[in-house]
Amino acid sequence: MTIKHIHKVHKEGRMILFCLFIILGLIDLALYYFTPRLLFYIVTFFTVIVFLLVANFFRSPKRFYPHEKEDVVVAPSDGQIVTIEEVYESEYFKDKRIQVSIFMTVFNVHAQWAPMNGEILVSKHHSGRFLAAYLPKSSTENERSTIVVKNEKGVAILMRQVAGALARRIVTYCKAGEEVEIDDQLGFIKFGSRIDLYLPLDAEILVKMNEKVTGNITTIARLKK
């Protein structure tokens, strides 16, 4: 199956980019009429760079998972694997789980996809702090959103969207009771963040520490049948 990457501007960024375009355009226009041409050219160059960087952050590729979707957990976001460890999950499962965490920089795509097919059991937002997202305690202290998905075989996993030091808004589209599938977008985090997955202890982890992963493409784990 061919992997398709169709890039467009994510809906979360359209108004921001429109306002930024107007503001930067007015600045450049004022410089054109009231300052020397050299200064105008220099500032215009930098305003174009700023606009392109913000536009790059809000890109929204249309991706299709290229493998069998049963009994797998797929990377919900782009980024780098920063945690693979057994932990006690205290919010929902209240037992030991394997935590796999993905850290996103401002250069990664910041949309999130469903990590597996199933029913949304929980979709809950938590207010919190804005510590650096790579810190372990950011998982429980930062602004975050908890999503629990259960597949048709009754196996549930928890996905947590965690805001970072620059992130100030987490958007979660799914609601409890809804059915989701791999390839569906579940949310978006603005400007640097982290995704935590809490998987059953018998899950076969298919990624390694510091590995770069691609949202809705990289297989994170295989669940026991």
Image: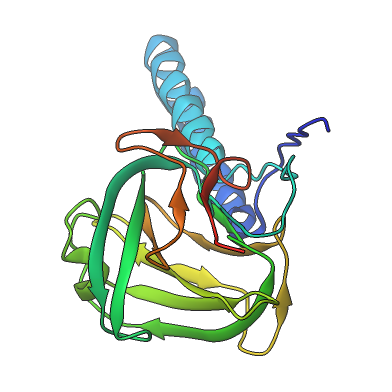
At a point 33% along the width and 69% down the height, the residue shown is: 97
Q: The C terminus is located in which quarter?
A: bottom right
Between 4 and 98, the one lying in front of the other is 98
Q: Residue furthest right?
A: 1
Q: The N terminus is located in which quarter?
A: top right
Q: Is residue 34 above or below residue 150?
A: above
Between 21 and 202, the one lying in front of the other is 202
Q: Residue furthest bottom?
A: 177
At a point 42% along the width and 76% down the height, the residue shown is: 145
In the figure, is residue 221 to the left or right of 39?
A: right
- Quarter location, residue 130: bottom left
- List x then y, in percent, for residue 3: 76, 33
- List x then y, in percent, for residue 222: 55, 53
At a point 54% along the width and 54% down the height, the residue shown is: 76
At a point 52% along the width and 43% down the height, the residue shown is: 109
Between 94 and 49, the one lying in front of the other is 94
In the figure, is residue 132 to the left or right of 95?
A: left
In the figure, is residue 18 to the left or right of 135?
A: right
**Can residue 168 be seen in this snapshot?**
no
Q: Specify the color scheme.
A: rainbow
- List x then y, in percent, for residue 96: 28, 74
